[in-house]
Amino acid sequence: MAKMTKIEKGERKEFLAEIRAAGGDVFTFGDSRVTVAIVPGIPNSERVRTVQAAVAICSEGDKFKRKRGELIAADRLLMGQSVPMQVGDADSFYDLAQEMAFTVSR
């Protein structure tokens, strides 16, 4: 995969800022070649019950690049290419992302 362009680098920064401003985050799992972006169903909610999650999976033939995965997963999340999921609380975002990465990398 080609290096990221200046435009892609700028978009990645914007997307990550928007996700974090909504109380979400992006998690990368290099071993499984998966990146997961998650935001609360209700942005910055005190009590998180549902989230929206999007996944980017790196093909076996491509070199895994963390920043490219973050760009793809964040773009999918912000464009509505995500799935709703139930979650216990905001502290479990990492656990949820890790479980999704394990599931999709099988």
Image: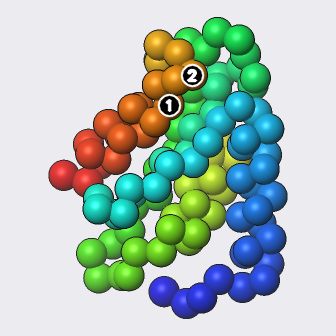
Residue at screen point 61% across, 42% down = 25
Query: Pointer 2 and pointer 1: residues touching (CB < 8 Å)?
Result: yes
Task: Indicate the position of residue 100 as horizontal and vertical percent values.
Answer: 35, 40
> SS class of the residue under badge 2?
helix
Q: What separation in Å lies between label 2 and label 1 (alpha carbons)? A: 6 Å
Q: Quadrant of residue 7?
A: bottom right
Residue at image location 78% in from the left, 83% down from the top: 6
Residue located beneath label 2 in the image: 90
Q: Quadrant of residue 57?
A: bottom left
Q: Is residue 91 above or below residue 64?
A: above
Residue 62 % position (x, y): 36, 81
- Residue farthest toward the front in the current orientation of the protein: 91
Q: Residue at 38% across / 68% down in the picture?
A: 58
**Residue 82, placed above or below residue 66:** above
Left or right, residue 10 beside residue 23:
right
Q: Secondary structure at mark 1?
A: helix
Query: Which residue is farthest top?
Result: 47
**Residue 20 visible (yes or no):** yes
Amino acid on which disc 2 is placed: Ala
Q: Residues within 10 Å of mark 2 (few under 14, many from 20)?
A: many
Where is residue 4? Give x, y as percent. Answer: 65, 83
Image coords of residue 21 (percent x, y)? 79, 38
Would you place residue 64 above or below residue 80 in this image? below
Extreme-bottom residue of the structure: 2
Colour convention of the picture: rainbow
Q: What residue does disc 1 label?
A: 93
Left/right placement of residue 61 relative to residue 48 reads left
Toward which corner of the image does residue 51 lie, by quadrant?
top right
Placement of 77 over or under 83, stated as above or below: below
- Residue type pointed to by label 1: Phe
